[in-house]
Amino acid sequence: MQRELQWFKAVENLLPPWARESKNNYNLTPREEFTNSHKELVKEGEKWMKDTAQSCTVAVTLIITVVFAAAFTVPGGNDNGGIPNFLEKTSFLVFVISDALALCSSTSSLLMFLGILTSRYSEQDFLVSLPRRLIIGLITLFFSIASMMVAFGATIYIVLSQPWKWVIIPIALLGCVPVTLFALLQFPLLLDMVLSTYGPSIFHPVK
């Protein structure tokens, strides 16, 4: 649908003003004819966007739940005064920062996907608005997953740095698996949408 709208805008810009409002044999302007001929495509695009946003919303909600709970269950526990026992450790600082970044980015991602679900899904929304929300949502989702895995690695380091140092590296490598899988599965879609929305195209010619 985005590509069709780009074609329509490109052709419309080439026409004189009077031709844009001229009517065909069915008494329809170019815009009205375009709307009638793309009704099914709009419905298909709406269904795909909603399905994608709903699936990502479930994943983001789980991440928010995990990182929010982790913020109040600090590794190593607290002393009698409520101060974390490993407050002075660099690894604890990494945990706090990565957990906060994961919470902020996942919340931002959730808002983007909710914006997609509550959109009007008019024709013009498919040109920039909806693709931009999906791009931001996927990027922030990836960032939240990566930050959550960093927090996980920092927690493992804090808890196991003394008794079982040898298990830290294998567990940290396993933590990279979800991030890598998400990047491999979603990067082609993200790249296509970025190029189609912001890259050189019929609507954004190379200067």
Image (cartoon, rainbow, N blue to C red):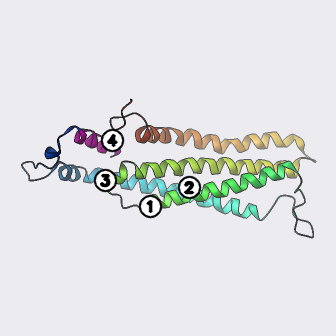
Q: Earlier in the sequence, mark 3 or mark 1?
A: 1
Q: Residue at x 81, y 61 (%)?
A: 74
Instruction: Name the residue beneath numbered marker 2.
Output: 109
- Kind of residue at disc 2: Ser
- The residue most toward the top is 207
Measured from the top left, where is residue 185 in percent x and y? 54, 41
Q: Which mark is residue 123?
A: 3
User: How many angstroms separate mark 4 from mark 2 (CA)?
Assistant: 25 Å
- Secondary structure under tag 2 reads helix
Q: Which of disc 2 and disc 4 is earlier in sequence?
A: 4
* Region in magenta: 1-13
Q: Position of residue 206 (x, y in %)?
A: 39, 30
Q: How many marks?
A: 4
| Amino acid beneath label 4 | Arg
Is residue 8 shown in magenta?
A: yes
Query: What secondary structure prevails in the magenta region?
Result: helix
Q: Residues within 10 Å of mark 1 (few under 14, many from 20)?
A: some
| Magenta-colored stretch includes residue 116 | no
**SS for tag 3?**
helix
Residue holding disc 1: 117
Where residue 37 sits: x, y (%)?
Answer: 21, 49
The residue labelled by disc 4 is: 3
For residue 70, side relative to residue 29 (left or right): right
CA distance for labels 3 and 1: 15 Å
